Amino acid sequence: MTKVMTVLFALLAPISGWTDDHTPTQQYLGFYYFSAPDPTAVVSAVDKFYASDCGKRYPADVALAEQVFNGSDTSTHFFLNTYEDAAAQQEAAEIFRSCPAAIAFLTELSESGVVFTMEHLSFALVAEGDSTKDFAFAKFDVKVEPQHQQAYAMAFATMMGTAAKDVALRSYGNNLAGFGNDKFTNSVYVGAETLTQLAQIQQALLVHPAYADFSKKTSGMRENVNTTQVLFIKSYPRQQ
């Protein structure tokens, strides 16, 4: 597996993703959840922001996702901001504190009835495949205590690596919520091009012997919080 080494690095380094010399070491994944009574108004507001000078220099790749099935959670959508490092995250925060177009964007969202419900900053412990080419995802939010993080991450990576020999997997991963983890600590995901393909992948995984072994090994390590079916609606790549 090409990226399993990130598991060991992220777990041996401080949880915030910094090395001893305080240099940022990996991408930061900012998740911003919200409820939106009028999703078209959200897309319109984002399009308008990205057409502005501030939007053109926004230092992150942004994707807008719909939570098709989300249990009792009130959020209906989320933004995923992929920051290359801490400096990019800081620059993005400064833009939203001071740029008129960013302030207008937030105002427009509020006026359309958008209510932000939760946010967290995560780091990839396991990341396989190209998730930017997938649009449908199954996301499993779980609580894993610090002393079990390494064992859980390795068990997940082993399960998926074994299953990949028999199942046509696309993207999958395990993200650690380093900040804002008041509901869960990890988000495990499996991606596909369509919901139909996602269902096929999930069904194949559920009956694979590697899944049974993973479930047995991790039953005392994790608490399942929520399972969400996600569809990505639109992406906004960094422009510079």
Image (spheres, rainbow, N blue to C red):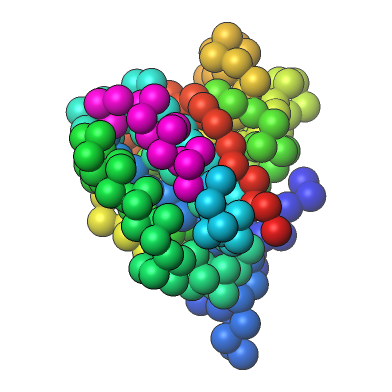
The segment highlighted magenta reads: 36-49
Residue 85 placement: quadrant: bottom right
- Residue at 25% x, 34% y is 112
Viewer-nearest residue: 58 or 67: 58
Q: Is residue 184 left or right of residue 211?
A: left
Residue 44 placement: quadrant: top left
Reply above or below: 123 against 66.
Answer: below
The image shows a total of numbered marks equal to: 0
- Residue at 39% x, 69% y is 98
Viewer-nearest residue: 197 or 134: 134
Reply above or below: 120 against 135.
Answer: below
- Residue at 57% x, 86% y is 22
Viewer-nearest residue: 98 or 198: 98
Let me know if residue 40 is in the magenta part.
yes
Q: Position of residue 117 (x, y in %)?
A: 24, 45
Residue 134 placement: quadrant: top right
Q: Is residue 116 left or right of residue 6?
A: left
Would you say residue 126 is visible in this rendering?
A: no
Viewer-nearest residue: 37 or 133: 37
Reply above or below: 65 against 110.
Answer: above
Q: Position of residue 215 (x, y in %)?
A: 46, 34
- Residue at 64% x, 52% y is 238
Residue at the bottom extreme?
A: 21
Would you say residue 22 is visible in this rendering?
A: yes
Q: Position of residue 10 (x, y in %)?
A: 58, 66
Let me know if residue 105 is in the magenta part.
no
Q: Main secondary structure of the magenta part?
A: helix
- Which corner quadrant holds the C terminus? bottom right
Q: Is residue 25 left or right of residue 77?
A: right
Q: Position of residue 59 (x, y in %)?
A: 59, 61
